[in-house]
C-alpha cells in the first residue's frame, strides 16, 4: 500500500506540472501574435466596391470635381454614367459640358479647363491632339444616322429620297459638326441632293426643331431618336445608304484632376459603361 504522504506529494507534483504547461501555452500564443508594435495595421477606410471595375476596389485618391466635355449626342448616356460614377466615388462631382464636338475641341485648344474629352468624331479628337490639348484616345462607341420625323408633319416620309420632295422642310446639323458631316455622307450614299431649310448647331438642336414641328424632318443619330421617347418618329436608313461615326475619348493634356478624369474614362470603357451606352442605342466600336 502506498503511503498517504506519497500520494499527496504525487498529486501536488501533477498540479504544478499542469500549471506550468498552461502558462507556457499562454506565453507561446502571445509570442505568435507579436507585440502591438509588430502588427501590420489594417486600413480603417472601407471603400465601396467599384461598379466600374467589376467589384474591384477603386483608387482612394479619386476626389474633387471632374470636368467632362462631351458630344451632345452623349447627353443621355453620360448623364446616367455620371450618377453611377458619383455613387462609386462619394464626394466626387462630375461636371458635364455638352455641345458640338467641333466647338468643344476648339474650346480645349483655346485653353478651356477640362479633364476628359469625348468626341462624336475622330477628326475633332485629332484636332485637339494635334494642338496638344488631348492625350491618346480610345474609341468607345459607334453611332449611325436615322431620319427623325415630326409628329406634326403631313408629309409622307419613309426614306432619304422623300426628304428632297417639294414642300418638305428639313434641318441638318452644321456641316463642320459630326452629325452634319455624317448626314451628308448618308445623303451622298443614297444619291439624294437637298437644300435644308436650316442648320442646327448640334444634334440636339436639330431634334428640338423636329419635335416642335418647325421642320418636317431632320437627320440625327439613332440614339437621339431613342432618347426622344416617342416625341418623334424614327425612319431607319438602309445599311447600304447609312453612315456611321466613331466616338473617341481621351484625358486632356492639362487636366486639372487627371486621376478622376482617368477613372471616369475607365467607367465609360468598362462592361457596365458599355451596357449604359448600348441601352442608349450606341453600337460597339
Image (cartoon, rainbow, N blue to C red):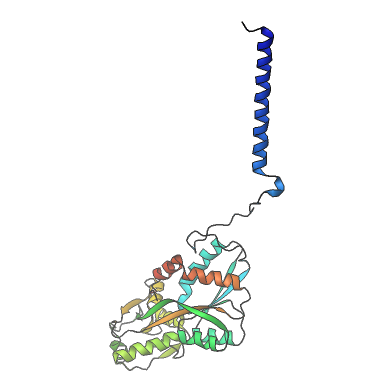
The residue depicted at 59 percent of the width and 70 percent of the height is 260
- Measured along the vertical axis of the image, is residue 194 above or below residue 13? below
Would residue 47 appear left or right of 198 to someone viewing this image? right
The residue depicted at 61 percent of the width and 70 percent of the height is 65
Q: Which of 44 and 233 is in front in this view?
A: 44
Quarter the N terminus occupies = top right
Q: Can residue 168 be seen in this view?
A: no
- Give residue 90's quadrant in the image: bottom right
Q: Which of 39 and 27 is in front in this view?
A: 27
Residue 112 drawn at (x, y percent):
61, 83
Would residue 109 appear left or right of 39 to someone viewing this image? left
Q: Furthest-front residue in view? A: 1
- Give residue 115's quadrant in the image: bottom right
Residue 84 drawn at (x, y percent):
51, 64
Q: Nearer the viewer, residue 160 or 12?
A: 12
Q: Is residue 266 visible?
A: yes
- Give residue 212's quadrant in the image: bottom left
Residue 127 drawn at (x, y percent):
52, 88
The residue depicted at 41 percent of the width and 72 percent of the height is 227
Q: Furthest-right residue in view? A: 37
Quarter the C terminus occupies = bottom left
Residue 86 drawn at (x, y percent):
55, 64
Would residue 29 appear left or right of 117 to someone viewing this image? right
- Measured along the vertical axis of the image, is residue 257 above or below residue 37? below
Q: Which of 25 and 66 is in front in this view?
A: 25
The residue depicted at 65 percent of the width and 20 percent of the height is 14
Amino acid at each position: 500500500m502506498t503511503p498517504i504522504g506519497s500520494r499527496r506529494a504525487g498529486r501536488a507534483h501533477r498540479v504544478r506540472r499542469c500549471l506550468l504547461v498552461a502558462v507556457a501555452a499562454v506565453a507561446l500564443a502571445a509570442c505568435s501574435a507579436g507585440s502591438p508594435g509588430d502588427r501590420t495595421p489594417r486600413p480603417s477606410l472601407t471603400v465601396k466596391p467599384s461598379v466600374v471595375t467589376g467589384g474591384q476596389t477603386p483608387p482612394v485618391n479619386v476626389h474633387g470635381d471632374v470636368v467632362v466635355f462631351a458630344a451632345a449626342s452623349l447627353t443621355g448616356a453620360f448623364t446616367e454614367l455620371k450618377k453611377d460614377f458619383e455613387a462609386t466615388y462619394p464626394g466626387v462631382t462630375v461636371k458635364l459640358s455638352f455641345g458640338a464636338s467641333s466647338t468643344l475641341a476648339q474650346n480645349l485648344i483655346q485653353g478651356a479647363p477640362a479633364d476628359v474629352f469625348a468626341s462624336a468624331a475622330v477628326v475633332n479628337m485629332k484636332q485637339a491632339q494635334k494642338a496638344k490639348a488631348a492625350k491618346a484616345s480610345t474609341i468607345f462607341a459607334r453611332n449611325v444616322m436615322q431620319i427623325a420625323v415630326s409628329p406634326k408633319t403631313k408629309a409622307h416620309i419613309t426614306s432619304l429620297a422623300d426628304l428632297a420632295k417639294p414642300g418638305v422642310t428639313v434641318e441638318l446639323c452644321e456641316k463642320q459638326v459630326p452629325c452634319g458631316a455624317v448626314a451628308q455622307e448618308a445623303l451622298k450614299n443614297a444619291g439624294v441632293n437637298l437644300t435644308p431649310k436650316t442648320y442646327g448647331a448640334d444634334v440636339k438642336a436639330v431634334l428640338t426643331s423636329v419635335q416642335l414641328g418647325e421642320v418636317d424632318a431632320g437627320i440625327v443619330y439613332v440614339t437621339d431618336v431613342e432618347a426622344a421617347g416617342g416625341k418623334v418618329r424614327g425612319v431607319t436608313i438602309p445599311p447600304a445608304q447609312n453612315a456611321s461615326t466613331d466616338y473617341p475619348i481621351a484625358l486632356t493634356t492639362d487636366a486639372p484632376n487627371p486621376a478622376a478624369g482617368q477613372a471616369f474614362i475607365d467607367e465609360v470603357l468598362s462592361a457596365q459603361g458599355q451596357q449604359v451606352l448600348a441601352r442608349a442605342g450606341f453600337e460597339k466600336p
